[in-house]
Image (tube, helix red, strand yellow):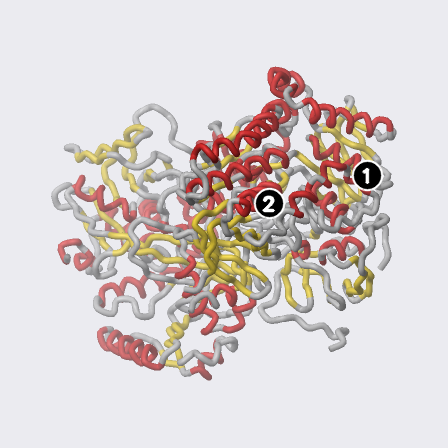
């Protein structure tokens, strides 16, 4: 079996992966950085080498911070491979990765999974209609193509990214019909006990308040405590109205585009496929793979850092990636334990500050119940078109968990491999059974974690 | 096929432009755009129908996660449009339901 | 429908294991007017039934044991009846097709060996064993997409396939509809023979029943001794690849590749001795893909969306275990690796035997004393 060998293989060229590559290369480790996108940056710094918007004020200085990380990839010890999709990690630390030239095997002493986050699936009636997309998708289109949603445009959801994208689109000259904030009433109170932690990161708090002020000054209509969100279709089956409840009334707004957002959750596809231990995080309402303080998982030599280990944001991801690289350098005898600890100190300090604000944000922006456990009519599995009602019926017929419902109604069997239904399916089952989500568990994910052609797979048999 | 669902483009930095065909109609897009972005710029929405119930869909996540942007690209079906960069002359079409086993051909295609 | 009540739970008959074997047998037992409960494990269990390839397959089965050939063919004949009963009871179409199946080979030698085997079986069956040997041209009459490397095939008109997941669901719904109970009891801890019947202890409490059927697949190994039986079964892993939905083009199932009713392409199967590891491995998946794409080069362009490994319930000779306990009458062992093919047999003659303790079939050849 032919395979290239490195000290450290990193999956994902976002802030965690790029920072780890930079730090590892500085310790003279040979690094291969694999990323499925055509350019480095991850989603947060997407297209940072060549952002589409002419005017830098649109995306703001936080985005352009990514330029330094990308610049540092230009190092003789870093082999950066764009357009390369990792689809398997075998027991012997061999990665299988697909690129336009076919699949190759890559072997490394240590592996870092820095696969980032994805937006939380937000099932509500009509969320599959053409015209509805995630806030993250709109941001990607803005960063990499300078494309903005067709109008009238409505944004709905909860969380910092909702406000950021609204502000960025406004700066880009897009008229926004309304921002619908679905954050439920009690969440400010729930978040209050976590305020002291948040106060350790005042600049971030100010940024959030600044965005709110910016939207207000722009005169953008904002509805609070929005519930019963629905996307309504015209005869051609595409979005034409958004219906919702707010201020004791049902409203309807015309819309060509509806952008939705309910926070982000770790991308755990690869860590799940490895069978690593995951724990349910109640405040973030998602699974976290279990790692030690240096990001190492229960599988020796396999590390996870950044948002794929638990949501903490881009700055935290950068620090976490740095820490992994230092620990790998120690394990591979480039640094002593004392040297590692010394070099880790600034990253640890910054990381603690970034993490301190999370419980406050997590409590404030926890999705409303209706998005976590949607009404019976709502599709949960977009690929196989399975509704919440069907899942509940499966539970009534005796299914205890998502692998049984999968076998019975195909939820999770489509090409997205459960990425857009897995969280919801577990939560719907848990609620119906009246047990905690971690008792219900998650889909058994198996490799390949991305579709690949049978021909490409067959060519590995040599 | 101009219609109200086209995604407009703001002032962008210097870039090359390439011509692709979306459902047989030529359109200029920015080099580096994804095929899914080209479809949105052209207003080709819905951009596919599902193999399960023929339901209309369009790109949703733009980051390779949801598989809603499946397109027929240069005769190959079920290609993730958001993960495919445009090339000059690329032929992009709607994905209609389940794919065929063999590569598809179109009568109106110049070959 | 979950047995979470705390009163004493009783049933005429309990089956331990709610896979295809247990459910089909249970359905047949209900037809005898019995009150039946199935004790089943949690969401994540070995569950060979979920990993099934879905063939209702006759050709080559029972090469060294004519009685196995006999029950396999009997089951295949009973299958359309089971499918229509399930449709009537539940409205679920299990997508049964029995228009024949092909076993393709990439070498002349393999075709010749299979032909010789099937000729022996024909002889053992007194001449009544339909099959044909096909060359590549003849294979293409059935499946035009067969590639140039195909050396030939054997064809049996009695072969077919079914959707195993729909089958699971239909069996479950039919069983529940007829008053059956499925208790998610967790793994059975002990079975105690009583003066009259049995007491079954589980993490979720106790059940009492007159008769008990062990249909727990690999779990039977530890359960059987509790009722004076022996179940020398061991795991054998099979990996299966699933490609995306494609418009119908493969109109006949083959031993390695079939198209499902949904349009997905299933590619299998490997036979690996790897203990209780039901995972997938790149090396074996690549090998499976290599063989399948040589048989059907058109598959090269199809995207694989899922894969799984499942553990077959194997015996040393590959044949089932059907046995009544002599020491503790009322206890039965039922286990095999072909829960789909034998499904109609389990729901019919086998259930009849358990209900009445009488049968015309030579079931004694399937007891564990043969090892």
Q: Which residue is mark 2?
A: A18
Q: In which image quadrant can residue B34 be found?
A: bottom right
> Which class describes the residues within 10 Å of circle 2: few (<14), some (14-19), or many (20+)?
many
Residue A51 horizontal side relative to residue A415, left or right: right
Q: Where is residue C362 drawn, in percent x and y? A: 19, 60
Q: Where is residue A412 drawn, in percent x and y? A: 53, 47
Residue A47 horizontal side relative to residue C140, left or right: right
Contact? badges 1 and 2 (CB < 8 Å): no
Q: Where is residue A366 drawn, in percent x and y? A: 62, 27
Labels 1 and 2 within one chain: yes
Residue C45 horizontal side relative to residue A352, left or right: left
Mark carried by residue A57: 1
Residue in the picture at 52% in, 29% down: A281
Q: Is residue C166 at all visible to an observer of this figure?
A: no
Mark carried by residue A119: none
SS category of the residue bearing label 1: helix
> Which class describes the residues within 10 Å of circle 1: few (<14), some (14-19), or many (20+)?
few
């Amino acid at each position: 079996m032919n395979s290239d060998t490195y000290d450290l293989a990193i999956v994902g060229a976002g802030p965690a992966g790029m920072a780890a590559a930079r730090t590892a290369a500085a310790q003279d480790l040979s690094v291969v950085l694999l990323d499925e996108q055509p350019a480095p940056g991850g989603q947060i710094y997407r297209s940072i080498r060549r952002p589409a918007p002419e005017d830098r004020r649109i995306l703001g200085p936080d985005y352009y911070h990514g330029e330094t990380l990308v610049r540092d990839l230009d190092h003789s010890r870093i082999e950066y491979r764009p357009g390369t999709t990792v689809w398997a990690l075998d027991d012997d630390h061999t990665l299988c990765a697909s690129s336009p030239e076919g699949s190759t095997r890559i072997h490394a002493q240590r592996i870092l999974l820095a696969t980032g986050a994805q937006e939380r699936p937000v099932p509500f009636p009509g969320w599959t209609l053409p015209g509805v997309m995630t806030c993250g998708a709109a941001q990607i289109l803005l960063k990499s193509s300078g494309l903005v949603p067709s109008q009238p445009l409505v944004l709905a959801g909860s969380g910092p990214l909702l406000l950021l994208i609204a502000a960025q689109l406004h700066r880009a000259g897009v008229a926004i019909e309304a921002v619908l904030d679905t954050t439920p009433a009690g969440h400010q109170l729930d978040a209050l006990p976590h305020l002291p932690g948040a106060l350790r990161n005042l600049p971030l708090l100010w940024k959030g308040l600044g965005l709110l002020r910016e939207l207000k000054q722009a005169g953008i209509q904002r509805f609070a405590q929005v519930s019963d969100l629905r996307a309504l279709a015209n005869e051609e089956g595409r979005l034409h109205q958004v219906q919702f409840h707010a201020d004791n009334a049902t409203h309807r707004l015309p819309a060509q585009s509806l952008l939705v957002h309910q926070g982000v959750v770790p991308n755990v596809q690869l860590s799940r496929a490895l069978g690593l231990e995951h724990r349910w995080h109640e405040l973030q309402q998602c699974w976290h793979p279990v790692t030690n303080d240096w990001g190492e998982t229960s599988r020796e030599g396999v590390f996870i850092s950044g948002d794929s280990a638990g949501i903490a944001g881009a700055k935290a991801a950068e620090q976490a990636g740095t820490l992994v690289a230092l620990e790998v350098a120690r394990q591979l005898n480039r640094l002593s334990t004392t040297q590692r600890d010394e070099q880790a100190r600034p990253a640890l300090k910054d990381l603690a500050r970034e993490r301190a604000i999370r419980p406050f944000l997590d409590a404030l922006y926890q999705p409303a119940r209706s998005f976590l456990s949607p009404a019976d009519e709502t599709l949960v599995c977009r690929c196989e078109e399975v509704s919440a009602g069907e899942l509940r019926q499966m539970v009534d017929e005796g299914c205890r968990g998502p692998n049984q419902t999968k076998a019975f109604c195909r939820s999770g069997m489509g090409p997205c491999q459960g990425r857009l239904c897995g969280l919801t399916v577990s939560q719907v089952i848990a609620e119906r059974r009246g047990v905690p989500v971690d008792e219900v568990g998650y889909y058994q994910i198996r490799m390949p974690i991305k579709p690949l052609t049978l021909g490409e797979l067959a060519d590995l048999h040599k | 096929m101009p219609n109200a669902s086209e995604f407009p483009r703001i002032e962008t930095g210097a870039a090359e432009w390439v011509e692709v065909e979306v459902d047989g109609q030529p359109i200029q897009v920015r080099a580096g755009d994804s095929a899914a972005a080209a479809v949105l710029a052209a207003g080709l929405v819905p951009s596919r129908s599902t193999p399960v119930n023929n339901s209309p869909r369009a790109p949703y996540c733009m980051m390779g996660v949801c598989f809603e942007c499946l397109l027929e690209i240069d005769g190959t079906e079920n290609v993730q449009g958001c993960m495919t960069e445009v090339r000059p002359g690329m032929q992009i079409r709607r994905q209609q339901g389940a794919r065929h086993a063999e590569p598809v051909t179109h009568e109106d295609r110049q070959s | 429908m979950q047995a979470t009540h705390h009163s004493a739970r009783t049933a005429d008959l309990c089956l331990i294991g709610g896979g295809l074997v247990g459910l089909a047998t249970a359905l047949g037992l209900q037809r005898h007017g019995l009150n039946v409960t199935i004790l089943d494990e949690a969401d994540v269990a070995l569950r060979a039934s979920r990993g099934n390839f879905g063939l209702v397959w006759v050709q080559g089965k029972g090469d060294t044991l004519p009685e196995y050939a006999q029950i396999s063919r009997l089951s295949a004949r009973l299958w359309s009846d089971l499918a229509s009963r399930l449709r009537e009871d539940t409205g679920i179409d299990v997508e049964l097709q029995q228009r024949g199946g092909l076993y393709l080979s990439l070498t002349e030698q393999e075709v010749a060996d299979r032909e010789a085997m099937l000729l022996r079986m024909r002889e053992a069956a007194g001449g009544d064993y339909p099959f044909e040997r096909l060359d590549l041209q003849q294979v293409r009459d059935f499946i035009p997409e067969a590639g140039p490397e195909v050396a030939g095939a054997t064809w049996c008109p009695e072969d077919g396939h079914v959707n195993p997941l729909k089958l699971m669901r239909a069996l479950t719904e039919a069983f529940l509809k007829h008053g059956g109970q499925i208790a998610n009891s967790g793994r059975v801890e002990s079975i105690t023979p009583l003066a009259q019947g049995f007491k079954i202890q589980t993490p979720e409490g106790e059940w009492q029943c007159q008769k008990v059927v062990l249909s727990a697949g690999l779990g039977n190994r530890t359960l059987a001794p509790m009722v004076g039986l022996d179940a020398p079964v061991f795991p054998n892993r099979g990996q299966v690849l699933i490609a995306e939905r494609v418009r119908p083009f493969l109109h006949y199932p083959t031993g390695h590749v079939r198209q499902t009713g949904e349009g997905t392409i299933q590619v299998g199967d490997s036979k690996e001795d790897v203990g209780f590891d039901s995972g997938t491995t790149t090396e074996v998946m690549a090998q499976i893909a290599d063989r399948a794409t040589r048989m059907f080069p058109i598959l090269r362009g199809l995207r694989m969306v899922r894969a799984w490994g499942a553990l077959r319930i194997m015996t040393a000779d590959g044949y089932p275990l059907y046995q009544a306990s002599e020491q503790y009458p009322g206890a039965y062992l039922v286990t095999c690796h072909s829960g789909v093919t034998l499904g109609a047999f389990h729901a019919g003659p086998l259930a009849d035997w358990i209900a009445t303790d009488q049968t015309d079939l030579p079931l004694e050849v399937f007891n564990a004393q043969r090892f």
